[in-house]
Amino acid sequence: MMRGRGKVTVVGAGMVGGVVAQELAKRDYADIVVVDIVEGMPQGKSLDLMQAGPVVGYDSTVTGANGYEETAGSDVVVITSGIARKPGMSRDDLLRTNMGIVSSVTQQVVAASPDCVIIVVSNPLDAMCHAAFDAAGFPKERVIGMAGVLDSARYRTFVAMELGVSVEDVQALVLGGHGDTMVPLPRYTTVSGIPITELLSEDRIEALSQRTASGGAEIVSLLKTGSAFYAPGNSAAEMVDAIMLDKKRVLPCSVLLEGEYGVDGLYVGVPVKLGAAGVEQIIELTLSDAENAALQNSAEAVRNLVEAMKNL
């Protein structure tokens, strides 16, 4: 018997959630449910997306909901809900608010879809993965954070702009926590297989690495009333593709490390193989002393956030 379409739930109908829902509808392999507590908003965005179907050419059903009944039996759930970072907001305020939202959402999602894979997009990303993992009671393979795909995309963009080459030929790798301690790896960043260390000077590489680490903050400072959504939304959709289509993509994601890279019990960004089961393999690279020190420093920043959550 042929299996019907897959089902993906997007929690949070804000800017990121809207882009995720739009991109997935265009893929045409799954029906989508958009959930938000604001009455009318997910329903309105979903109806708008349905009406784009005839123009774009997709038959995906997009449903808006304020509860979780419609989400039952989802294959993948993308959690984008939470308040966006605002200029001047304290870390603890963001942590406290979003920890409560992500924990509550996860419990409701899991009750309706006990076999789903959860992709966390809410910030602060690595800490919110811990909140979701604790609330879900799932194996670690099925709770994954979207950070590295976005950070790598930013790095690839800046490298392509610097060299005047197609972004399609730039492959990049960024490890560590999603924030200003992230670890871009120039040695593993290539243009059609040529390491950028052969193409750019050390100080230009350092400048591009710094710009990548503060890529989100740069957009927040320009927008003034919000944060990035096109690149994050598309990055989440790429991860959904890998899972729903069992593509075995090797992508940097935030996953629970248990000894890999010398990190234990923390969600940190590393390259993984993503397929139908979620995280199917954690890929361990050989790092130089400097790269390893930077990764440990990034992991420590995540650990501090996780400890802060316990004390809130």
Image: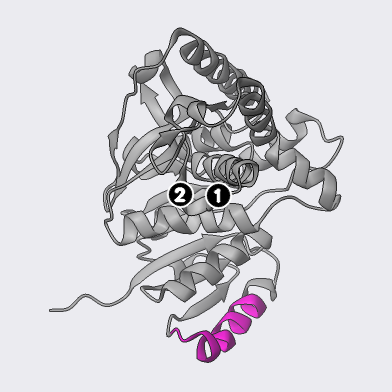
Does 46 lie within the magenta span?
yes
The residue that mark 1 highlights is 165
**Residue carrying label 2:** 169
| Rendered location of residue 122, percent (x, y) | 60, 45
Is residue 136 among what the camera can see? no
Residue 269 appears at what percent x and percent y?
A: 47, 31
* Side (left or right) of 246 relative to 217: left
Quadrant, the C terminus: top right
Question: Is 310 left or right of 264, judged from the image as shown?
Answer: right
Q: Main secondary structure of the magenta part?
A: helix
Q: CA distance from mark 2 to mark 1?
A: 7 Å
Q: Which residue is farthest bottom? A: 54
Image x and y of residue 260, in percent: 34, 20
Element type where label 1 sits in the image: loop
Residues shaded magenta: 43-58
What's under tag 1, amino acid-wise?
Val
Is 13 or 54 nearer to us in this picture? 54
